[in-house]
Image (cartoon, grey):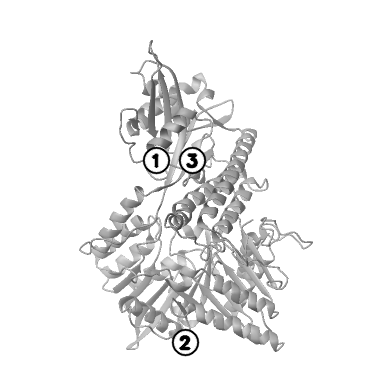
């Protein structure tokens, strides 16, 4: 399924990635509440997939283009149908898994009940909670007399209510929509009984109170079934030239809310007449993905399922470790002046990144700070530190990517605040997203400007740093930092393309440099010199780069790939990719680093990077791949790669079967994320 020619279609490979997330929800070795949260991640991923990828394929289909070349040999029309079939099957599996988890929670005295299971003792609480907190927030729309259905919000959940009035002559039906309020917790803890904790889902709490809500109607029956619509999330930045960039973006975000529908999910027990009425009113037809689901939608909310004090049903918490030799007391810059340091979150604390900027903001010798920002945390110490630096007279330049998908509004909020405080903002490069993660500061030392900085594989975001694994290099290497400065110059003078001796920079050089590095391995294989390629990525979907790896495999180069998400390459095929092995690791943390290691005849070339091998990263974004020159950090990166490669607990093998099979071998059990923490713990103990 999905294998066309030499590649796996990108969209189908992504669905396989989400199936791996679903496997975690099904895995009985995963703590129960964490399993619920994986179900939430699965659902959230699917929402974004339909908003972005399904919507893109649908646009290709509507434009009358077959799309075979871009879609790996499939037509857009066939791909849309296959996606819908796969998603229906996955949704069905996810509902079974949810039922299993809910039943198992009962064994731990946690009961998730519906409106029919509320006891007399709990009834008063449920009624009061509804009247005081829920009822004032409800938007309730009677649809019968409306010529047009109101524009339903993207990814909001609605209860579709069908009411049969108690009339003598004819049974008049009324159809009503109730929007589930987003500002109220979805999981409501209600009074305990018999030593059990009870949760009622907000939807059911509303169902319980339908009689109160519609007390003015004389009806003989009433029912409520959930529906959800997903809309195309593409932003349209064309239009009025007089509008500012931020105004255009805000207007475009507003339009996104009203984008074309691409998926309609409904409770499969809904009455036929109610479903027909809604589809007709919304103008939804067979070109949209119509998916029968369960009683509850927006299962992404399970990502925030309450802990309920049940620590035994959660992953064990590990304290983030210090980086060996680097202290949060005293000056970081003094330490970095002596040697480079590698921070690997969440194993290491993210506090070093914040501390670096706070120190720079206060240090009288620091004259300027330049940084790229892609996704800021909701409460960002990074942004606060930059504003603090301006107040202390530093020149602060921030390249902020306002088009970071689904974080646009958050980034705009901080951009406006920083602009008010005097930070110089650069809104990216026309036609290119700025996705690189870098910072450089200039400090006056003995009448000479000396640079310090950091380059990362991940966003400078305190929240995601707790759950995303990412490398950050702190360095005072003047050659590298001078070239990072060149990247900032490119942001301001887009027509001037610099040359780089050290960094690999997209969109101008990444593809050609990576191809040359692979060519070197091919040549070394032919000459029987040490050769090999080790790569860790989020996604691998660029067909030209895949072809290059196939060429290297045919030349005898051994290639190891760790790819979390999309992998359009098919490993292990005789005559094409027999020297390529590829795995994916899905576990407690989200694997996010990009790491490239080329054996290079026994003198390895090692890079950390913001760039995946996707066409957009190589050709349509500003990305930085940074060389690692310090031997001990080269070794550290190789060792952490090998720990991941040896995983035989959470690793799945990519293969032509495309079946997400867990890696099975006779080696000692290695769960790489736990082993990586132990690796860094041991480093701290080891005095060498």
Question: Which is more N-terminal, label 1 or label 3?
Answer: 3
Mark 3 and mark 2: Cα distance apart in space: 52 Å
The residue at which mark 1 appears reads as: 283
* Residue 530 percent location from the top left of the image: 69, 84
* Residue 96 percent location from the top left of the image: 62, 39
The residue closer to the viewer here, 269 or 168, is 168
Of all residues, the one furthest to the left in this rendering is 242
User: What residue appears at the point 46 percent right and 32 percent down from the top-left corner?
Assistant: 275
Please say whether residue 630 is visible from this viewpoint. Answer: no
Image quadrant in which the C terminus is located? bottom right
The residue at which mark 2 appears reads as: 501
* Residue 340 percent location from the top left of the image: 51, 78
Q: Which mark is residue 265?
A: 3
Of all residues, the one furthest to the right in this rendering is 666
The residue closer to the viewer here, 107 or 559, is 559
504 lies above or below 647: below
Which secondary structure, mark 3? Answer: strand
Mark 2 and mark 1: Cα distance apart in space: 56 Å
Question: Which is more N-terminal, label 2 or label 3?
Answer: 3
Q: Nearer the viewer, mark 2 or mark 1?
A: 1
């Amino acid at each position: 399924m999905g294998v066309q020619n030499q590649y796996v279609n990108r969209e189908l490979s992504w669905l396989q990635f989400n199936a791996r997330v679903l496997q975690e929800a099904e895995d009985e070795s995963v703590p129960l509440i964490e399993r619920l949260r994986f179900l939430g991640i699965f659902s959230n991923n699917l929402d974004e997939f339909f908003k972005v990828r399904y919507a893109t394929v649908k646009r290709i289909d509507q434009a009358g283009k077959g799309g075979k070349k871009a879609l790996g040999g499939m037509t857009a029309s066939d791909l849309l149908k296959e996606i819908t079939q796969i998603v229906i099957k996955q949704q069905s599996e996810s509902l079974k898994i949810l039922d299993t988890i809910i039943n198992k929670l009962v064994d731990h005295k946690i009961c998730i009940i519906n409106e029919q299971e509320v006891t007399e003792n709990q009834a008063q609480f449920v009624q009061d909670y509804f009247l005081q907190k829920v009822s004032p927030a409800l938007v309730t729309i009677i649809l019968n007399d409306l010529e047009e259905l109101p524009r339903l919000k993207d990814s909001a959940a609605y209860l579709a209510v069908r009411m049969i009035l108690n009339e003598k002559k004819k049974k008049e039906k009324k159809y009503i929509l109730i929007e589930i309020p987003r500002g109220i917790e979805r999981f409501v803890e209600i009074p305990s009984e018999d030593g059990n904790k009870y949760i009622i889902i907000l939807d059911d709490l509303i169902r319980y109170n339908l009689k109160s809500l519609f007390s003015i109607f004389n009806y003989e029956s009433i029912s409520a079934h959930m529906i959800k619509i997903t809309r195309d999330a593409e932003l349209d930045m064309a239009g009025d030239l007089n509008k500012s960039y931020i105004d255009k973006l805000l207007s475009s975000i507003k339009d996104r809310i009203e984008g074309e529908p691409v998926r309609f999910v409904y409770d499969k027990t809904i009455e036929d007449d109610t479903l027909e009425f809604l589809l007709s009113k919304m103008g939804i037809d067979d070109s949209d993905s119509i998916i029968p689901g369960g009683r509850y939608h927006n299962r992404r909310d399970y990502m925030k399922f309450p802990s309920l004090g049940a620590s035994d049903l959660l992953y064990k918490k590990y304290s983030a470790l210090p980086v060996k030799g680097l202290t949060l007391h005293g000056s970081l810059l003094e330490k970095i002046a002596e040697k480079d340091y590698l921070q690997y979150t969440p194993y290491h604390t993210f506090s070093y990144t914040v501390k670096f900027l706070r120190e720079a903001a206060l240090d009288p010798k620091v004259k300027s700070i330049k940084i790229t920002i892609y996704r800021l945390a909701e409460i960002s110490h990074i942004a606060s530190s930059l504003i603090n630096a301006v107040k202390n007279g530093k020149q602060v330049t921030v390249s902020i990517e306002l088009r970071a998908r689904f974080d646009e509004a958050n980034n705009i909020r901080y951009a406006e605040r920083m602009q008010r405080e005097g930070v110089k903002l650069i809104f990216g490069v026309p036609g290119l997203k700025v996705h690189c993660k870098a910072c450089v500061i200039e400090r006056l030392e003995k009448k000479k400007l000396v640079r310090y900085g950091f380059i990362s594989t991940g966003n400078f975001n305190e929240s995601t740093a707790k759950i995303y694994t990412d490398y950050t290099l702190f360095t005072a290497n003047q050659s590298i930092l001078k070239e990072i400065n060149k990247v900032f110059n490119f942001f301001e003078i887009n027509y001037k393309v610099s040359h780089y001796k050290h960094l690999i920079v997209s969109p101008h050089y990444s593809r050609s440099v990576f191809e040359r590095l692979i060519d070197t391995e091919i040549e070394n294989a032919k000459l029987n010199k040490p050769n090999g390629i080790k790569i860790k990525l989020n996604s691998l979907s660029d067909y030209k780069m895949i072809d290059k790896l196939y060429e290297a495999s045919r030349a005898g180069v051994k290639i190891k790939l760790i790819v979390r998400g999309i992998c359009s390459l098919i490993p292990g095929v005789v005559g094409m990719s027999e020297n390529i092995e590829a795995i994916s690791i899905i576990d407690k943390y989200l694997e996010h680093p990009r790491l490239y290691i080329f054996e290079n005849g026994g003198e390895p070339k090692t890079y950390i990077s913001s760039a995946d091998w996707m066409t957009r990263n190589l050709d349509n974004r500003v990305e930085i791949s940074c060389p690692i020159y310090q031997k001990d950090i080269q070794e550290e990166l190789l060792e952490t790669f090998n720990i991941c490669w040896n995983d035989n607990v959470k690793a799945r093998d990519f293969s032509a079967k495309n079946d997400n099979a867990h890696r099975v071998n006779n080696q000692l059990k290695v769960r790489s994320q736990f082993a990586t923490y132990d690796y860094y713990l041991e480093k701290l103990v080891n005095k060498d």
